[in-house]
Image (spheres, grey):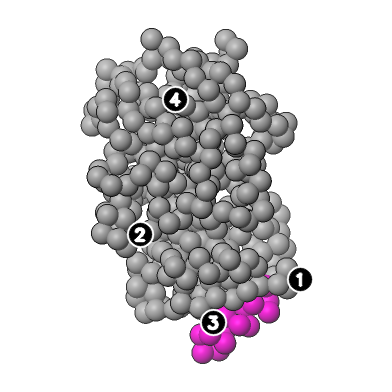
Amino acid sequence: MPIDCRAALTTGKGDFFIDQIRVADPGPDEVLVQLKAAGVCHTDYDSLNWGKSIVLGHEGAGIVVATGSQVTGLKVGDKVMLNWAIPCGHCFQCTEGNQHICENNSPVTGGNHGSNGGHAHAEGTTYNGKPVERSFNLGTLSEYTLVKQGAAIVNASSRMSFEAASIIGCGVMTGYGSAVNAAKVKPGSAVAVLGTGGVGLSVIQGARIAGAASIIAIDINPARLEMAKQFGATAVVQADKADKGLLQAAEKVKALTGGRGADYAFECTAVPALGAAPLAMVRNAGIAVQVSGIEEEITIDMNLFEWDKVYINPLYGKCRPQIDFPAITALYDNGRFLLEEMITRRYALDELGKAFDDMLHGRNAKGVIVF
């Protein structure tokens, strides 16, 4: 029987509002999830200006309340974390091991978003009687969501809160995976992390778990730098907004790494002007990683590439959901991955505006909506 519930929506013209939507019964390969918590991400704020009506949100965790006839491995009552990058398993990229950029299901790489792709069936979610798209095929800023089976990953942890589980499926996975899967940080290495929000803190944790000997956190916010120490930073550099390209901060990084520069540097600020900044912080033949997903034209001084430096732009930490989500959960359970500590504030759905404001002004490492 269809469910009427509250959700955050946008027309895509810069606004958002809370109203009732209707969620249908699951189709054969679909799962109906009652959301218990949803992370608030910069991408959610960006989606207010995508020019289309959507149910907001793409980080979430909850409980399975119904499953379709073809669903296997999931049952009513299961606690699940939601994943927006659903691999089809048989396209070129999936068979190459690049499940995060599936050619058929990805909502961001040009894949099929129709009934055979990552979306639940077209009539699955309606607003005022008309179908409405769910952000990243999830729409987690809603009391209920209808998703494809591959979007729901069982949370086997006996103690992880729904709030902590909700943030794994974007920012945490992006940061951790960028360090572990994409850059493949080596034990004993030196790492610089630009920006210490939720993604940056997850990079720091990934680098720590990978065995980095030196992890240098760079931010303009002293409170966030103090938090970075809790998550594994061994040194901090407070940056100056007037420092163009963070070249002065780069000199401090070099001083902390014997004058050579870091082995790896990760940009996690989402500030386009800083897209090239990690190149200034890595040694010759070092690896610079653009983590925050800058999608606009920037200018790069090619001198920064000298010599033999590598610049990579991974998506979603090269996520393999059935491998990486359980790995993060296991690290959490044995005390090596801090998730509860990353959540700065919790909000009701009606407080979404406050959650956005706190995020945009750097007050939170991570804000979470609790249903």
Q: Which residues are magenta?
A: 246-259
Instruction: Estimate the spatial distance between the alpha carbons at disc 2 and disc 1, rounded to whole Å.
Output: 34 Å
Horizontally, is 167 left or right of 252 in the view?
A: left
Instruction: State yes or no: discs 2 and 1 in contact (Cβ < 8 Å).
Output: no
Instruction: Estimate the spatial distance between the alpha carbons at disc 3 and disc 1, rounded to whole Å.
Output: 22 Å
Instruction: Estimate the spatial distance between the alpha carbons at disc 4 and disc 1, rounded to whole Å.
Output: 45 Å
The residue beneath circle 3 is 261
Q: Nearer the viewer, residue 136 or 366?
A: 366
The residue beneath circle 1 is 242
Q: Secondary structure at mark 2?
A: loop
- At 69% from the left and 36% from the top, the residue drawn is 49
Horizontally, is 36 left or right of 346 in the view?
A: left
Q: Nearer the viewer, residue 363 or 169?
A: 363
Q: Residues within 10 Å of mark 1 (few under 14, many from 20)?
A: few
- At 51% from the left and 38% from the top, the residue drawn is 369
The residue beneath circle 4 is 144
Q: Of callouts 2 and 3, which one flags the residue occurring earlier in the amino acid sequence? A: 3
Above or below, 150 relative to 98: above
Instruction: Estimate the spatial distance between the alpha carbons at disc 2 and disc 3, rounded to whole Å.
Output: 27 Å
Instruction: Name the mark nearer the viewer: 4 or 1.
Output: 4
Residue type, label 4: Tyr
Q: Of callouts 3 and 1, which one flags the residue occurring earlier in the amino acid sequence? A: 1
Instruction: Estimate the spatial distance between the alpha carbons at disc 4 and disc 3, rounded to whole Å.
Output: 48 Å
Q: Of callouts 2 and 1, which one flags the residue occurring earlier in the amino acid sequence? A: 1
- In percent of width and height, residue 274 lies at 66, 64
Q: Secondary structure at mark 4?
A: strand
Residue type, label 3: Gly
